[in-house]
């Protein structure tokens, strides 16, 4: 468990002005401490990621647990989001007689922004929480300590394979989300509303680029996979080794992972736009 910055009882009962300054400074000290510890932890896991490739079966096993088991919710969410995007774009573009641009708007929205962000948020809620719970339970049951006693590096054996699996799984899930989202908009606008099918697919083929549009979202999802899985590993590895501690760590994973996806998406978009 990570060492904590202790607050003495005397400081909490100190109502002088310098006591108030100390109390206000504790959150900053704790934040800087956690940032430093998290950065050091991430570098340690990354340094052992090369060793994880020596265990391809282990990487594939984690890829199955955090990728395949998340696929169903990705497909269902992508389909319904495609339905909504198709209806909303059709309603908007019909006012100006520009229904031919519907498929372009849907594809760009999914490929550039909504696909990687929505897939990342679903990935946090489904896969990253299971990672935190798994690592936290191994620590609570002293399996992590047993590995260290047997001279087995838990970072290389348990954490690094999960990191690699997450960085592989999320881009693949994003691709599925994008494809199903486009198909959803096709079903609702072409099959139900009656938009011309040739116009729908010609717009995507002619005005949506592979590298500048589709791959932009894939690059985002690779980084989202890294940062969200790293948060899940950190929270699980440094959680309080009790049932309540694991539950709180899982909650922190959802909060921090979701905010990290949204914040990183803004940074990526700001750089890519300019």
Image (tube, rainbow, N blue to C red):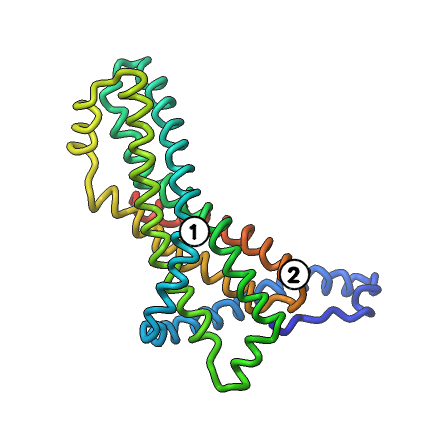
* Residue ID at (32%, 75%): 54
Q: x, y percentage for residue 207?
A: 18, 33
Q: In which quarter of the image is the C terminus?
A: top left
Neighbourhood count class around disc 1 (C-alpha, 10 Å): few under 14, some 14–19, many 20 upward? few
Horizontal side of residue 74 vs 30, given as left or right:
left
Q: Residue at x 81, y 69 (%)?
A: 9
Residue toward you, 137 or 253: 137
| Above or below 11: residue 122 | above
Give the answer, above or below, for where 71 lies relative to 58: above
Relative side of 226 to 36, left or right: left
Q: Can residue 210 be seen in this view?
A: yes
Q: Is residue 81 left or right of residue 36?
A: left
Residue 272, position as x, y percentages in the image: 30, 47
Q: Residue 46 carries which label?
A: none
- Dot 2, how many residues are within 10 Å of its Cα: few (below 14), some (14-19), or many (20+)? few
- Which quadrant, please, contains the N terminus? bottom right
- Where's residue 173, x and y in %? 35, 48
Residue 24 position, x and y percent, is 70, 59
Instruction: From the viewer's side, name the closer residue of 244 and 106.
Output: 244
Q: Name the residue: 44% across, 50% down.
A: 123
- Which circle's residue, 1 or 2, is located before the other in the chain? 2
Q: In this view, does 3 lie to the left or right of 206?
A: right
179, above or below 255, in the image: above
| Residue linked to disc 1 | 69
Q: In which quarter of the image is residue 25?
A: bottom right
Observer-nearest of 59 and 258: 59
Res. 33 visible in picture: no
Q: Residue 27 carries which label?
A: 2
Distance between mark 1 and mark 2 Cα atoms: 38 Å
């Amino acid at each position: 468990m990570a060492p904590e910055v202790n607050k003495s009882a005397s400081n909490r009962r100190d109502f002088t002005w310098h006591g108030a300054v100390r109390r206000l400074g504790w959150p900053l000290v704790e934040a800087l401490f956690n940032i430093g510890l998290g950065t050091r932890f991430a570098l340690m896991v990354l340094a052992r990621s090369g060793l994880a490739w020596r265990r391809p079966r282990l990487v594939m096993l984690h890829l199955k647990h955090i990728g395949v088991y998340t696929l169903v919710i990705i497909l269902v969410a992508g389909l319904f989001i495609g339905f909504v995007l198709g209806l909303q774009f059709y309603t908007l573009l019909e006012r100006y007689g520009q229904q031919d641009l519907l498929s372009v708007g849907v594809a760009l929205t999914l490929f550039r922004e909504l696909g990687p962000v929505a897939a990342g948020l679903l990935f946090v809620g489904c896969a990253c929480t299971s990672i935190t719970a798994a690592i936290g339970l191994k620590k609570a049951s002293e399996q992590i300590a047993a590995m260290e006693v047997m001279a087995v590096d838990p970072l290389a054996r348990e954490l690094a394979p999960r990191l690699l699996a997450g960085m592989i799984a999320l881009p693949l899930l994003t691709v599925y989300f994008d494809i199903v989202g486009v198909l959803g908009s096709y079903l609702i606008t072409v099959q139900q509303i009656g938009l011309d099918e040739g116009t729908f697919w010609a717009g995507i083929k002619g005005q949506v680029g592979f590298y500048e549009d589709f791959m932009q979202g894939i690059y985002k999802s690779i980084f989202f996979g890294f940062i969200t899985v790293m948060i899940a590993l950190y929270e699980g590895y440094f959680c309080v080794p009790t049932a309540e501690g694991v539950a709180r760590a899982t909650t922190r994973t959802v909060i921090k992972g979701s905010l990290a996806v949204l914040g990183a998406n803004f940074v990526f978009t700001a750089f890519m736009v300019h």
